Amino acid sequence: MKKNILIIEDETRIRFLLRDYFLKEGFNIIEASDGDEGINYFINNKIDLVILDIMMPKVDGITVLETIRKVSAVPVILLTAKGQEEDKLFGYEMGADDYMTKPFSPKVLIAKVKALLKRTSEETFSSLKEYDGLTINKLSHEVKINNEVINLSPKEFELLSYLADNEGIALSRDTILDNVWGLDYYGDLRTVDTNIKRLREKLGGKASYIITVRGSGYRFEAKK
């Protein structure tokens, strides 16, 4: 399936140039000439990657990036005439995945896009665990049971993810405490038991995936 690239760039010449290059590479292209238009297109289309100019009329690129990051982890490459280190650092801090300073090589940009899409695809695959009626999505920090999202606390999500990552392995309470709460946590082992109990209650019929290992700790066991 072709990937959808959203190009948000107010300079027509650059936008058309990029469109032509990406079309030749087999991508679907959606164009926006300002930030407002870009946000609208992003909301109403399935976008796989965004190429975003920073300096634009109406709504600037950083504001667009902030808006995108509130709802999506889609890869974003920033384009700008600014080349100072502080500008690049600010872009990364706001959630950009990569950065290109004008003038740039369209071929290099395409290479960056392909690398980002490949990495994102691999991360999505490894970050999504699906069992019989139970789905754990590390990218969105969501757990679903029969396609219904269940409300877990951040620590409960970390606990379930850690157990699932070590499926079939008996994990001691000490090991769980160190890896989920951290080596500098000074609580006792009952913290693990208390959170396992709450997690099981929220998992309902899927609570049986978390097995108590007598005299040791817990093990995650489920049929995919």
Image (tube, rainbow, N blue to C red):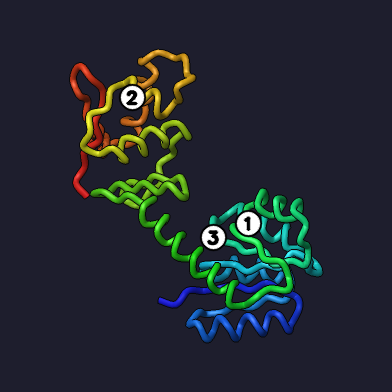
| Residue that mark 1 sits on | 96
Amino acid type at mark 3? Val
**Of marks 1 and 3, which one's residue comes earlier in the chain?**
3
The spot of residue 33 in percent (x, y) is 72, 76
Question: How far is the residue under mark 1 from the one under mark 3?
Answer: 10 Å
Horizontal side of residue 164 vs 112, given as left or right? left
Which amino acid is tagged 2?
Answer: Thr
Q: Tell me where residue 221 appears, x and y as whole percent.
A: 21, 38
Q: CA distance from mark 2 to mark 1?
A: 35 Å
Picture quarter with the N terminus = bottom left
Q: Secondary structure at mark 1?
A: loop
Q: Is residue 59 visible?
A: no
Amino acid type assigned to the residue bearing label 1 in the image = Ala
Depth order, front residue of 198/140: 140
Disc 2 designates what residue?
Answer: 175
Residue drawn at x 72%, y 63% as measured from the top left:
61
Mark positioned earlier in the residue sequence (2 or 3): 3
Q: Select label 2 or label 3 by which is in front.
A: 2
| Residue underneath mark 3 | 74
Left or right of 202 in this view: 39: right
| Residue 215 visible to an observer of this rendering | yes
On screen, residue 47 versus residue 62, left or right, reads: left
